[in-house]
Image: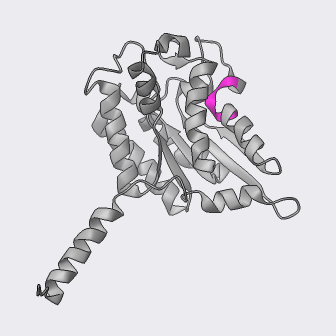
Amino acid sequence: MLRISSITLFFFLTLFTVQNSFAQADPKNYLNDIKAELKKEWPKNRTINLVFHGHSVPTGYFRTPAVHKLEAYPFLTLKQLKEVYPNAVINVITTSIGGENSLQGEKRFKRDVLTHKPDVLFIDYALNDRSIGLEKSREAMEKMIRKALKRNIKVILMTPSPDLTVDILKPDNILEQFTSQLIHLADKYNIGLVDSYGAFYELAKSGEDLKSYMAQSNHPQKKGHQVIADEIVKWFK
């Protein structure tokens, strides 16, 4: 009969706990408290604030300088959520700025983001963070994540939407590298992840021409934004 000492058992239990503590939040239950609030009816309900922080894509830029805010993924998400939760009061707040990277976004995070008291915070900077590199991006992202979690805000990271100048099917391309880093951060902090990159990768892999989803090389049109919104809504069902 195999005997395991209490010390050995403690070691393996500790190792198991540590390994399993580094995992992304589960879409099935991460937003359970938010979903419960969304189901409430007047006069027991309250306003739920969904804040989208990032660059030009959540802002709604299509072919620059045109801004189609009501066709961008934050508001497409709102439209779908109202179908699921018809009695909910939902604010969609975009604190994003076209052309911005996460270093810039982190500097104004307290003033422009936390002031809105987000119930759920979506952060979408990877597409523009190519200009500052992986390390600086990670540092800025972690600062924002920690500040949000300190206030018990639910955080969901967004992997990058396409840039047609990058071959999405090429292994280890720059957008894939940022996607991998965001996956690691979601694992590290037990927070959510919307894999926009993965959704577009699967479309390209199946033979779809991603040009039909884009208004210009780095900005989706409504069809592309709908792909992202569909991935977000999965967290609320």
In the rendered picture of this protein, how many numbered marks are placed on residues? 0
State the image quarter where residue 197 is shown: top left
Q: Tell which residue pokes out farthest to the front in this image.
A: 1
Q: Which residues are magenta?
A: 71-75
Q: Is residue 30 above or below residue 183?
A: below
Q: Position of residue 107 (x, y in %)?
A: 48, 42
Is residue 181 left or right of 157 when viewed as pictured?
A: left
Question: Which image quadrant: the N terminus?
Answer: bottom left
State the residue at coordinates (42%, 15%).
Answer: 207
Q: Main secondary structure of the magenta part?
A: helix
Q: How is the image coloured?
A: one colour
Q: Is residue 107 magenta?
A: no
Q: Position of residue 160 (x, y in %)?
A: 44, 30
Q: Position of residue 102 (x, y in %)?
A: 44, 36
Q: Is residue 132 visible?
A: no
Is residue 136 left or right of 96 when viewed as pictured?
A: left
Q: Is residue 49 above or below residue 213?
A: below
State the image quarter where residue 154 is shown: bottom right
Q: Position of residue 184 (x, y in %)?
A: 33, 47
State the residue at coordinates (36%, 44%).
Answer: 183
State the residue at coordinates (32%, 41%).
Answer: 181
Q: Is residue 173 visible?
A: yes
Q: Tell which residue pokes out farthest to the right in this image.
A: 43
Nearest to the observer: residue 31 or residue 51: 31
Q: Is residue 148 above or below residue 130?
A: below
